[in-house]
Image: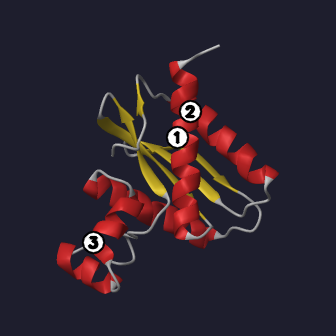
Amino acid sequence: MPDEPDFATFTHDDSWRLGSALVAMCRAESLPVTISIHLGEQRAFHAALPGTSADNDAWAMRKTRVVRHFDRSSHEVGQAYVGADPALFHAAFGLPAGEYAPTGGAVPIRVQGAMVGVLAVSGLASIDDHQRALGALRTAATAQASPG
């Protein structure tokens, strides 16, 4: 959580700006990713770029559920709890494997320390999904902190 940015506010308009900027960056590199932003329980932004499938949508949602459940990035959860056997993670926490994916790519969106949403990226290697999501969130927080 120390590496996660903290916003003063985060609205539907902010989710549109963040999602659109991330889409533009990924399109420029021809990356096959799905990007999803939830505010609370509502999906406020979703984009599936060329080369993705419904499977990427499902992975993004499974990562999002991990963030909501543990209040930390899906990458952090994977690093802390999964080890060499993901089945042990699912058994230990009683979470169905088809609904929870403790792998990189989803990060909490925080306003004054409280989680208000989740940004998820799916389509690349786990660490690359995580770095894309976290990098985009940091860029958006920096832009919000220094407007104009």
Picture disc at residue 73: none
* Rendering coords of residue 54 (x, y %): 61, 69
Residue picked out by circle 1: 137
Q: CA distance from mark 1 to mark 2?
A: 5 Å
Q: Is residue 110 left or right of residue 128?
A: left
Whether residue 100 is visible to the viewer of this picture, yes or no, is yes
Kind of residue sitting beneath label 2: Ala
Picture coordinates of residue 68 (x, y %)? 32, 53
**Residue position for label 3:** 81
Res 9 → quadrant: top left
Quadrant location of the C terminus? top right
Judged from the image, the secondary structure of the residue bearing numbered disc 1 is helix
Residue at (35, 55) in percent of width and height:
67
**84 over 66 or under it: above or below:** below
CB atoms at circles 1 and 2 under 8 Å apart? yes
The residue beneath circle 2 is 140
Q: Residue at x 27, y 57 (%)?
A: 69
Q: Please rate how many residues cluster around mark 2, counting C-alpha atoms within 10 Å: few if below 14, some from 14 to 19, many from 20.
A: many
Q: Residue at x 62, y 67 (%)?
A: 123
Label 1 Cα crowd, 10 Å radius (few <14 / some 14-19 / many 20+):
many
The residue closer to the viewer here, 47 or 102, is: 102
Residue 103, image x and y in percent? 43, 69
Q: Residue 40: x, y in percent?
A: 37, 41
Q: Does dot 2 land on a helix, a strand or a loop?
A: helix
**What amino acid type is highlighted by mark number 3?**
Tyr
